[in-house]
Each structure stands twice: as C-alpha cells, then as structure tokens.
Image (cartoon, helix red, strand yellow):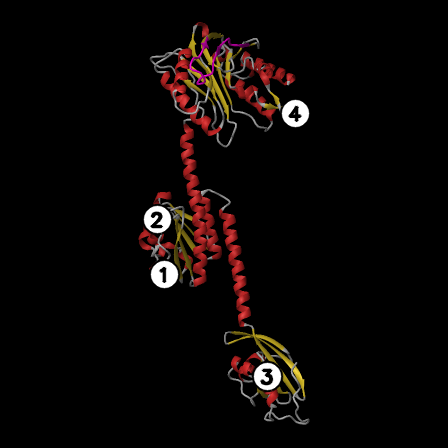
Amino acid sequence: MVAKLPLQTGRPRHDEPVPALLRAALDATTEAVVLCAAADHRITLVNLAAARLMPGLTVGGPSRAGPLGDLIGDLIDGDRFTREHQGRHLVGERRDLGSGHYGWFLRDRTEEVRRAEALESERARTAFLAETGRRLSASLHLGRCLRTTAELAVENLADAAVLVLPSDKRQNLWVRLAAGGRIEEEARAERLLAEVPGLLEALGGFPPVQSRWLDAAQAPDWLLPEDFGPIGGLLVTPLPGNAEPAGALVLARRGSFGPEDERLARIFAARAGAALSAAALYREQVDTTAVLQADLLPPELPQPDGLELAGSYQAAREALRVGGDFYDVFAPTETCPDTMIALGDVCGTGPEAAVLTGKVRQTLRALRLVETKPENILRVLNKALLQSGRRRRFVTMVIGSVQRIEHARLRLTLATGGHPAPLVLRLDGRVDEVPVSGTLIGAVDRTTVRPADVELAPGELCLLYSDGLTEARGGPSGTELWGEQRLHDALSACAGMPAAATVERLRQLVSDWVHGGTRDDIAMLAVRAPARAALSLRGGGARNASPWAIDARRNDRRARQRA
C-alpha cells in the first residue's frame, strides 16, 4: 500500500518537493505510478517504470494532456481503463491517496495479451488439425478426399484452393474451390504445370517456396474464378505421400501469408497428402481386386435350346464376394457336342479357397477340350491337384454332361468326387438322389469314381448343390442345421416351377432359416428340361396359363404349410 504524502494542508502545489524516501520506494516498484494533484490535475511524480512505459510524461504537466491524457482523456469520472497505446496493451486504475492527491497505477499487459492470443491461436490450429484428421479419415474415396481437402483449406487457410494430382494418379486431375463457390474439377492440368509458379517443383516433391518469393502477379487469370479479384498472396506446397508426392496444393489469398500461416499450411498439406495417398492406394487395390475377382465370380450361364440352366452363389463373406464354392457351364463345341456342367466345393473359405477355385475352373476348361467323360475328367483333375506343389487342399465336385434326346428329354451323365449326390425333382413332386459316389479330389493318389446316368422328362429338374446349403445353421435355436430333409421337402414343393424360380425359392428359404447368422459358402446349379406347355405358350394372360405355373402356386402353398 502506498503511504500518504506528508504534505501540508491547504492548497497543494505541484512543485512541492517529494520526500526522497517516497521517491526511492516508488522508483523501486515495477508498477508504473503517476501521482497527480487533485485540485489542478497536474502531475506531481512519475516513477521510473512510468517513465519507461510512457516517455512523454513530465512532472508539472497536466495529467489530461500528453500520453496519459490520450488514455484517460475521454473517461467521465472513471477510475479504470484498458487501452492500447503505441502497440502496447495498458491497464490503468485511479486510486485516491488523500492529502489532495491521487495516483494512476499503470500495468503493461502486452505480453500477457500476446500469450493469450498465441494460446487461442494454437487452440484454433489444434482444433482445425483435429477436424482435418476426422474428416479426411472418414472416407477412402479419392474424389471425396480431394473435395474435403479443398473445403478445409478454403474454410481455414485461404480464400481459394487448387489441388493437383500427379499424372500417374489421375491424368493431372485438379480440383478448385473458392470461398462461397462450388467445387470445380478438370481432367487435365498441363496448363497449370506450365504457368503456375512453383507447381512443377511441388509435384516433384521439392520443399515449398516461401510465399514472399512467389510473384502472385505471375499466376494466370484462369487459375481462380473470374470474380476472385487480385491475388494478394500465393502459396504452393507439396502434398507428401507414400514414398512419392500425392499431389500439390495451391493456396491464394486476397491478403498475404505470414510465417505462421505457411507453417500451418505445411502441416495441413502433410496430413492431406497422407489421406490422399491412402485413398489412391485403396483405389488401386480395389481395381486390382476387381480384375482378379472377374474370373472367380460365377459365370453368366448360357441358355442352349431345349435346356434351362439357373445358378446361385452366396459367399460366406459377403464383402469378398468370392469363396470356395463354384459352378460353371461349358457350352457345346465341335469336338464335344454335349453341354458340360460342374459344381464344386474347395476346402476352406476366403481368398485362399478362391485362388484354388480359379485354378480348378481353368483346369476343367482345359480338360474339356481333350476329354468328354466326367469320370475321366475327375481322375485327371485329381492328379493335377496332387502335383500342384502347394499345401494340399482337397475339392469335392460334381461333373456332368447334358445331352438332348428324343421327345424333348435330357440325359445327364453325372460323376462325383466326395460331393453330395445331385437331386432329381420329378413331375409328381418326388425327389430322387442320383446314385453316384466317388472319393475326394486332391486328397489321395488313387481315386474311385462311380458315374450314373439319369433322364429328365419335360418339366423335370436336376439340382447340384454344395453342402453349405444343408449345413446352414439357424432356426429357432440359431444352431440347428437346415438339413437334407428340409431340402427335399422344399424342392418337392417346387415341382413344375422353372429352374430360376426353383433356385431362388431355395435360396430365400435358406436365408430365412439363417436369418443373418454365420454360414458357409452356398452354390446351386439347376438343370431342367423345359415343359412342353412352356415351350408352346408365350404369354396370353391367365386363360393361357401353363400347367407348371398352376402347379407351382399349388406347391408353393404346400411348402409354406410344411414350414
């Protein structure tokens, strides 16, 4: 607390001497103190801190003029102020000292304000970078990542942003966005490379050039929207990627870029580059996977005259779309006039099983050219798998040849290697198992195959299926097998239905049984001799409805009652 001045009572004088001890005490304090006479508001004392803070203060001068007057001149009976003076943030408080004097106690808060502003700025930068990470990590779609990067840059760094991808990424695609505008894309960016200063170096991965060294006037007029106006500052920075630049970022402001702005832009570019690089890598992997999956997915089935074919495949892992079960149909050729059908189940699921599935299908396609008997094809395939040199994986399979015979009938010669026997659906709803048997393919050196022949009358159907159909677990307990009996009953209810409708019906029943639970790969292939009525009637409404359509509705009601 400041001691009261030992001055005489009566009219105070500004030129009265101040005790040396009091002056020494005030000069020793770090707080700026200005003593004034209450009567005429003239300055009585200025300590050293106040003299350093406001060099223009003079003893004997009026307090409401000069530097102090600039701070308190418009105060009306006020005791406090917070003002900015010559780049300094000052806080002042007036205190009554008695004996006709008062004092202004001044404090310089410049560093405190700067620290608070720096803290607030750092918090804003941290929030911006956190938002950048959250939004860029939300998608691996390259186009969406590009648009998000442009939006973040315009919202936080600049008035306009242009992103350019290298030519090996997407033919020099570039994306442009200005504040208040919409995203614009161009497929080619050769003009950018030639006319935008620093862009070619940024795409090459060179360190960014400071904004003050780039002449914004050299930027072409078409770089930014027509209504953008003059460019005050231009910044070009690379987008670091995985071992190579993911692209380049061009930022434009109507004002200028400061050192902190450039530092923040480089940090943002590093994070955006990592996201774009990951998105580009993901797209390349997706494209590669799609190419590899093309030959592993179920084929589009041919529809030879006098023969109905329908297939269905459900992978255990829907995201992968391929697995260990497969079916294939080989159309007649000059050397083999019969249609060949095949359905198999490779041991395991997922990518490894899918790879072996592709090899087996290609092997069958080659064997088809030199061998026509299904049992011989299985024996040769068994030897080929045993000699593959990889860890042994066995295969179960059904192969058959389909031949058209008299009276619109079909003759099937079927051979199996450790696979569930095909089922034959007769016109009266009876379901028969084809009497075939055989050992696993690719498991032992010596294989035994016992083929069988079966004939289909018009309207009858033969179903080839994998064990994933009967071993699907679900029902009330969630663990009960669908089983062979339910398959026979469901197939019997499909008597008279087309092949495609029969396969779809079985697929729906199994899906309802599993109701979202885990299951194995499921493959089905149906071969049907078209009904004569279906061949002769094409449309015509209800009065021309074919017999199999009427039977199908009746059998469908029976299946629902049994379920």
The answer to which of marks 3 and 1 sits earlier in the sequence is: 3
**Residue 26, numbered label:** 3
Query: Where the C terminus falls, by quadrant?
Result: top right
Q: Position of residue 559 (x, y in %)?
A: 61, 16
- Residue 396 shows up from this direction: yes
Residue that numbered label 2 is attached to: 189
Between the C-alphas of marks 4 and 3, the distance is: 90 Å
- Residue 182 shows up from this direction: no
Residue that numbered label 1 is attached to: 216
Q: Position of residue 85 (x, y in %)?
A: 52, 76
Check disc 4: other Cα within 10 Å, few if <14, some if 14-19, many if 20+.
Answer: few
Above or below, 214 against 278 in this view is below
For this orientation, the residue located farthest to the top is: 406
Kind of residue at disc 3? Leu
Q: Position of residue 455 (x, y in %)?
A: 48, 7
Which of label 3 and label 1 is nearer to you? 3
Q: Identify the residue at horizontal 35%, vertical 58% (top origin).
A: 219
Which of label 4 and label 3 is nearer to you? 3
Kind of residue at disc 1? Ala
> Range of the magenta residues?
432-451
Residue that numbered label 4 is attached to: 477
Mark 3, secondary structure of its residue: helix
